Amino acid sequence: MPIVIDYTGSGVHRVFSGHIDFVDVFQANGKVWGHPDWHKFRYMVDDLRNISSTSFNRDDAALTGKMHIPAASSNPRLRVAAISTDPKILPVLEEFRPLMADVGWQYRVCQTSEEAWDWAVPGGKPRQAGAN
């Protein structure tokens, strides 16, 4: 799976790389949502800057958004930051905005790692989170 998941105590940091498809996203979400501390997490920072290609599209985003409904029932207070400047990825990320709002999660697309961490986590990036 081209997604590295780092649990940082009160949240999740995921780094996507290479080719990403629906199955990759589905599996990564399942791992996070199945974590024993899922209900305690307050943020998720998704770094998408190293995606080389994707077959994940708007229809996949809509389906994934529907899967957020049960996940949000056990964790309704999540802040999700997505990092990307790729013009091919940004339209798909924007599809998540209303889907995240529907489940009560705050969502923001950021251009830099610093912007994402400053927004998602009070006090900024935790020490144990990935280097970027």
Image: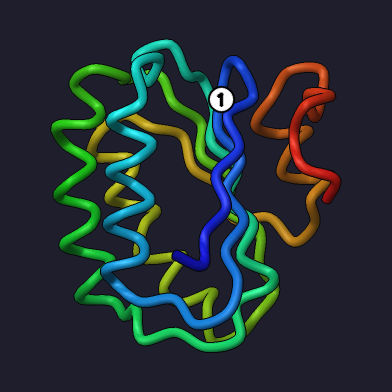
Instruction: Using the rendered view, name the quadrant where residue 7 is placed.
Output: top right
- Establish if 2 lies above or below 55: above
Which residue is disc 1 drawn over?
A: 11
Q: Nearer the viewer, residue 55 or 1?
A: 1
Q: Residue at x 61, y 16 (%)?
A: 9
Instruction: Using the rendered view, name the quadrant where residue 110 is placed.
Output: bottom right
Kind of residue at badge 1: Gly
Q: Nearer the viewer, residue 18 or 61?
A: 18
Residue 58 percent coordinates (x, y): 28, 76
Q: Nearer the viewer, residue 5 or 61?
A: 5
- Image side of residue 88 versus residue 71, left or right: right
- Counting labels gives 1
- Establish if 12 lies above or below 49: above
- Image side of residue 130 versus residue 104, left or right: right
Q: Residues within 10 Å of mark 1 (few under 14, many from 20)?
A: many
- Image side of residue 69 versus residue 43, left or right: left
Instruction: Using the rendered view, name the quadrant where residue 33 is placed.
Output: top left
- Establish if 67 lies above or below 17: above
Q: Residue at x 23, y 53 (%)?
A: 65
Q: Residue at x 44, y 64 (%)?
A: 1
Q: Which SS class for mark 1?
A: strand
Its colouring scheme is rainbow
- Establish if 96 lies above or below 11: below
Residue 84 percent coordinates (x, y): 66, 67
Q: Residue at x 33, y 46 (%)?
A: 29
Residue 18 percent coordinates (x, y): 58, 79
Residue 91 percent coordinates (x, y): 46, 77
